[in-house]
Amino acid sequence: MTPTRDNRLSTGVKGLDKILNGGLLPHRSYLMRGGPGSGKTTLGLHFLIEGDAGSSLFVTLGESEAQLRDDAERAGLPMDSVEVLELTPGQDEDEGSTSLLESWDIAGNSIHETILNHVREHKPERVLIDSLSQLRYVTMDAYQFRKQVLSLLRGLTAEKATVMFTSETVPGEDDEALAFLSDGVISLEHTENGRLCRINKLRGSGFADGMHYYQLGHGGMTLYPRLVPDDHGRMAELRQLSTGIRELDELTHGGLESGTVTLFSGPSGVGKTTLGAQLMTEAARRGERSVIYSFDEGASTFYTRCKAINLPVKQMVDDGYLHFEAVEPLHYNPDQFAAVVRAEVEERGTSLVMIDSLSGYHQSVRGQDLAERVHALCRYLVNMGATVLLVNEVYAITGNQTRVTEHGLSYLADNILLLRYMEMDGELRKTIGILKKRAGNFEKSIREFEIAGSGIMVGPPLRGMRGILSGVPETVKDGGGESL
């Protein structure tokens, strides 16, 4: 039977079991609905194969047994342990027969009676009917169709079978009768933003609400449950983490706190990623593991840049203190990415996570609410005691209005570091300042920031100047300004 928590039956898809709070309640009927190619049959195969050998029955009302077994083998889901009851139209037709209704008459019995008689004789624990909506076309009217389906489902569950059945979602046809008659409804949808699963109904049990991404490939279905931060957490000690740069520690009054979210805000090329690499170098010195998810840059470019300024990130990768992953956002969905991050934190003990950048991550969200997704991911990481670095690119190089982020995400940050350009003496110079630090006080001044061959250098506070954040500062008389 392969029971799960609370004596539930596993669907054979780990992620789906999770959003079903452990699996399916036994001896009930469950509808899988969706359009052609959405993965209904694939999910049904997982359900059957998960059962003990000889305990699963596939009732096919559309494809032949030979085709089913061949397709399942090619998909990496061999049906060797599954019995097939083939009730496809025309399998016993005499030559010249033209009646569709007659072609569904199996040995003098209705399809409904044939299925029930087989189950009574062989006692399968798991039954998949694919597709029950086919009965609609050989039933006189909607009332008779509903009556036949109700009788069939009640008869099967009375025989201690757990039933999954599929229904094609076809425009202009109503399958709400099937949804009403079932104990649970699993909807599968193939959208322009990816494949999405939703549990619409589950009698006798709670379930994880919302849309959950899934993928189909060799080996079947993989479902990624939507991340719910409150479901995760562990005790972690709040520590102050040095940046490894004395002047930057002075600016932050000792460094950044562990288990917080820090937003690096600045235009392209100002040094946001490099600053994050500096913090990870310091983490490695403490014996802690970090990870960079780069949506904007490949590993070779990143390693080369860091080597040029004496940051040993390649050695940190080789020693296991740093993992760099170049992420192609169009190949990831947010639930899949969250699963990757969870594995890094929960299985490998990673304590410092950098997402570079929010604009790149936005591409993987594809039309959904970026703030909602980033909020869930950051809250999860903080609950797990991890320190989070978010890299955000602002599009204005200079200007009178200082914008922290175009995505409205500054509320998520416990700390905000502003990196900006300023023009001085006909050349671009860089500055750094702290806009926000929830866990303690910080220096209110702005300092010059430089990336050189020897590493990152932070100068003394820039005194006697105004308009620095506008990009074109002015000297205040008798100010005695300082720079690098």
Image: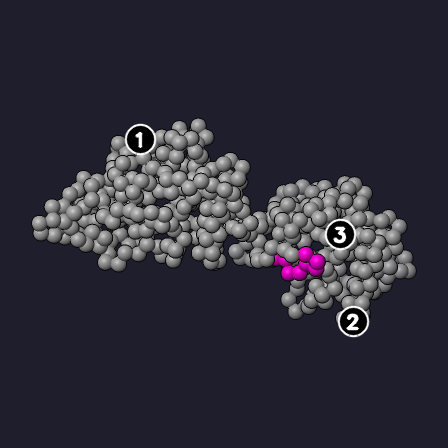
- Single out the mark in the foreground, 3 or 2: 3
Residue 423 vs residue 204: left or right? left
Any magenta on residue 366? Answer: no
Q: Secondary structure at mark 1?
A: loop
Dot label at residue 111 = none
Rendering coords of residue 283 (x, y %) = 39, 34
Q: Image point 70% across, 63% down: which residue?
A: 179
Rendering coords of residue 40 (x, y %) = 67, 54
Residue 234 appears in view: yes
- Single out the mark in the foreground, 3 or 1: 3
Q: Secondary structure at mark 2?
A: helix
Residue 415 appears in view: no
Instruction: Compare marks 1 and 2 and give the one earlier in the sequence.
Output: 2
Q: Which residues are magenta?
A: 198-205
Q: Image point 51% across, 43% down: which residue?
A: 234
- The amino acid type found where label 1 is placed reads Asn
Label 3 crowding class (10 Å Cα cut-off): few <14, some 14-19, many 20+?
some
Q: Which residue is mark 3?
A: 26
Q: CA distance from mark 3 to mark 2?
A: 28 Å
Is 303 drawn above or below residue 481 in the view shown? Answer: above
Rendering coords of residue 196 (x, y %) = 58, 55
Q: Which residue is mark 2?
A: 143
Residue nearer the viewer, 88 or 258: 258
- The amino acid type found where label 3 is placed reads Pro
Residue 15 vs residue 3: left or right? left
Residue nearer the viewer, 374 or 481: 481
